Image: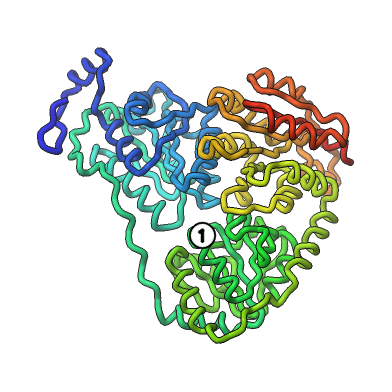
Amino acid sequence: MAESGNRTAGVSEAELEAARTAGVEVDNVGLAVLQVVRAYGVDTIFGIPGTHNLEFYRHLERLGIHPVTSRHEQGAGYAADGWAQRTGLPGVVITTSGPGLLNALSAAGTAYCESRPMLILAPGVARGAEFADIGSLHETKDQVTAAGAIVEWARRVQTAEEAIEAVHDAFALFGSSRPRPVYIEIPLDLLEGAAGIDQTLLAPRAASPASEIDQEALAVVADLLAAATRPAILAGSGSIGARDSLQRLAELLGAPVVTSLNGKGVIDEHHSLAIGSELRLEAARAVLNESDALLVVGSKIGESELWGGVISPSGSVVRIDILETQRHKNLPSTQALIGDARSTIPALEAALADRLSDASPRTPHVDVEAVRAAAAAEAAAFAPIEHALAGRIARALPENAIVAGDSSQITYYGMTSQVRAREPHAFLYMAAYATLGYGLPAAIGAKLASPDRPVVGVIGDGALMFSIQEFQTAVEQGIDLTIVCVDNGGYGEIQQNEQDRGIAPVGVQLAQPNWPQLVEAFGGTGFAVREQIELEPRIADALATPGVTLVHVPLALFS
């Protein structure tokens, strides 16, 4: 289409319709929005084409964006989450209006709760048709408000310029604040209409400069940590951008490091100071509580990971977080540094190096290996069967495997402890939102983002049944992916909860499919473990077999 300078000439609706009919390229608002998304580096989107979102899908091939069609929008969101964790870019989900968007909101809730970047794009009713209640296709009372109750912010735009600005604002949020999902709704008539956008508006914008560090507070924190004799560090996902500097800081202090599950691997869990992602275990919490200076970096210290335990250090607490609202969240701070860990931790490292330059190298005040052993014994005593089985599964996996879990007992009783991650985002999980159905699609997204790494999902049967349709997505994408299905016959934890309340098992002992045959029906390869001794050989067989594979592991064999 003709252009004048940097501005696309206005095009009438009749001309657009003629172009669509003729099958030629159409420069509409859908294209403009995706041009901005692509300019920020996103080359993969997740979703399902629908009647109302086709003017997004029209442009994907033209822009070099790979579409991944899930078999349910919830799976699209979880796959986008896995992809985002591995790439460091926001996962982008395109849904249709109404049910498509609402199906994706559980994944948006996960991204919000776990602080992960996600951009959801969807059409809405045409401008002027809001709240018409006339029975139109996919009619929803108020989908932008529904989304807004879940995500960081939701906007229904009214012009092409507003749509472009909303995308830029989303990427600004992802780059300079706590990453959380956002939703942009584009009215159908606007989505399909001519853009008429100044092309310079489509270029990516530089990230906002880091806020200035409070030098006075920095000096206080450095003095406090330098004087500590029992320092310790609790690192959450907000610390990942500063991982190298954080490790050096820990080494300067001789501070043992415990992480949240979202911070797992921020320091190699084989490092001599790494206790691991064991906030659920008293052995790890005791190290934090006995400290005379606890440094908390990028973590809200969520109660869902404490399992009834308490973080209450005997000494001072220093919080480093990008948001002022986190200064006293779940644990009051003695002193706080508000700012991005990517700039704050290196500054603190330098300040500490100045103060400790004449000191002897510090050793941790606790025997980290002994703490690890105590934590392992505690975990084994709590859930001996799952802990032991998870250990065998973890040892059977390649060292560089990316592991996806689900809200399954095999994950939170076993794999979270038995997998010792060497890097962040090599263990995909959602400790706070604890949704079922996450593991398989998240593994798909991770594999698409990291095609040269083995990706393995270790998932309970109840959780896997929430997303078995995504086996077809994995097969269609032509990826190698292994799922280890640990079958405890249904909803094992809820059955235990019922028993604890004196309730006879109700709704928790579930009929099971023939799992190997099920995955084969989707085009994969199934393996059955029939004796304990077969566990490791079957996992090895699955990993060596191209395509999508599943290993069925009846938990009863290991009881």
- Among the 4 quarters of the image, the one containing residue 18: top left
Categorize mark 1 by other alpha carbons within 10 Å: few (<14), some (14-19), many (20+).
Answer: many
Q: Position of residue 431 (x, y in %)?
A: 63, 50
Vertical position of residue 74 compared to residue 309: above or below: above
- The answer to which of 127 and 354 lies nearer the viewer is 354
Residue at 36 percent of width and 30 percent of height: 64
Residue at 14 percent of width and 36 percent of height: 7
Q: Position of residue 322 (x, y in %)?
A: 45, 64
Vertical position of residue 317 compared to residue 111: above or below: below
Q: Does the image show residue 127?
A: no
Q: Does the image show residue 109?
A: yes
Q: Position of residue 276 (x, y in %)?
A: 68, 60
Which residue, given by chain and number where applicable, does mark 1 sit on?
Answer: 238
Residue at 47 percent of width and 48 percent of height: 88
Quarter in which the N terminus is drawn: top left
**Amino acid type assigned to the residue bearing label 1 in the image:** Gly
- The answer to which of 412 and 228 lies nearer the viewer is 228
- The answer to which of 311 and 155 lies nearer the viewer is 311
Residue at 46 percent of width and 82 percent of height: 219
The colour scheme of the drawn protein is rainbow
User: In the image, 431: left or right of 346?
Assistant: right
User: In the image, 522: left or right of 35?
Assistant: right
